[in-house]
Amino acid sequence: MKITDVRAHHIRIPYDAGVASFRQGASAITALDMVIVEVATDAGLTGWGDAFAYVSPRTTRSAVEEMIAPQAIGLEVPDAAGIPAVMEQIQRNLHLFGRYGITMFAISGLDIALWDLAAKIKGVPLHRLLGEIRRPAIPAYASLLRIGAPDNIAAECRKALALGYGAIKLHETTRPVVFAAREAIGPDIPLMVDMNCPLSGEQAIAFATACRDAQPMFLEEPVWPPEDFATLADVRSNGGLGIAAGENACTEYQFRQMIDARAVSHAQPSVIKVGGITEFLKVAALADQRGVKIVPHSPYFGPGLLATLHLLATRDDGLVEMFYLKREACLWGGRADVDATGHVVVPSGPGLGYEPDRGVMERYRVG
Ligand SMILES: [Mg+2]
């Protein structure tokens, strides 16, 4: 079976996050922009992938069309055992366009589609190719957008718990909101604090120390720049809290540097950024070997979310990150949402398990 075409679809779905937003600044997210990668074959089977896009959908899309499609069209579709070699060759072929960032996001999109195809050819759900299923549904955490005001934070935390969520992550950078959240959810609900890289090492140690009594499970990306693993390690050893990072790291190679530096207690590979399922699996194996926990980055709703569910299904622990917002439409007919017990069911159909709704794709297509 040969690959006959690789297409990148830019889909833009509006969302409502109430009092919260990521609508300001350079990384404003005014809608859910995604780039879905469609890999067609001469047997009529289609594989679906997902390449990180947020504020760069046109750039990601052209990276898939200009860099990835010529690498993939005409290739024999590999089985699961053959995917890593195919992907390594493509990484080698494209290395001069950047080992991290957009190039790797586009590579991730192809990789996920190849795994979807490999599982569909076998007629099994993706997780069956990855190992024994340990969990048919994955506990989710509500990944709140930036809110700011302590009263609003407390109200949003209570709403999330009422919906069934059993864990909360804030995207905040001040001490009062962290304590407001802890007070609202009580002592037993896991609380995480994602800072998105604003601080120096010294500031981050002070912030971690000040937040200790609120008992966050971890502080995520407290330090600028994200690849300063030595400073992150310093914050981890002197701040007294767990440290999470990894959404801005690509490939196992960069995670190895992070883990060798003892920078993190929790590694956060993002399947649509890190290099796809192939690199995610390598990162997870490394983290397991080194006693680092895996808590994937997955604030997205395309094929990458489904891939994350399959990856977590074969593990005993690890929460799935669910972006806490209401989207106007769903590619999966509402099947990849959190249930009243705070879990997301792992799809059991062939490949990723669900096919994207072509009607939704057409209605929200850009370009
Ligand atoms: Mg984050």
Image (tube, rainbow, N blue to C red):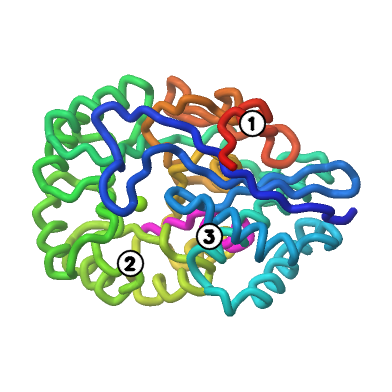
**Residue found at the far front of this picture:** 367
Reading the image, the residue beneath label 2 is: 226
Above or below: residue 312 compared with residue 247: above
| Discs 3, 1 touching: Cβ within 8 Å | no
In the shown orientation, is residue 140 left or right of residue 48?
left
**Residue found at the far bottom of this picture:** 96
* Between discs 3 and 1, the one toward the N terminus: 3
Amino acid under disc 1: Glu
Reading the image, the residue beneath label 3 is: 284
Q: Element under label 1?
A: helix
- Is residue 307 visible in this depiction of the protein? no
- Place of residue 145 in the rendered image (x, y in percent of width and height, measured from the top left): 30, 39
- Is residue 33 visible in this depiction of the protein? yes
Q: Residue 362, labelled with which disc?
A: 1
> How far is mark 2 from mark 1, CA to CA?
37 Å
Closer to the camera in the image, 207 or 100: 100
Amino acid under disc 2: Pro
Q: Is residue 107 magenta?
A: no
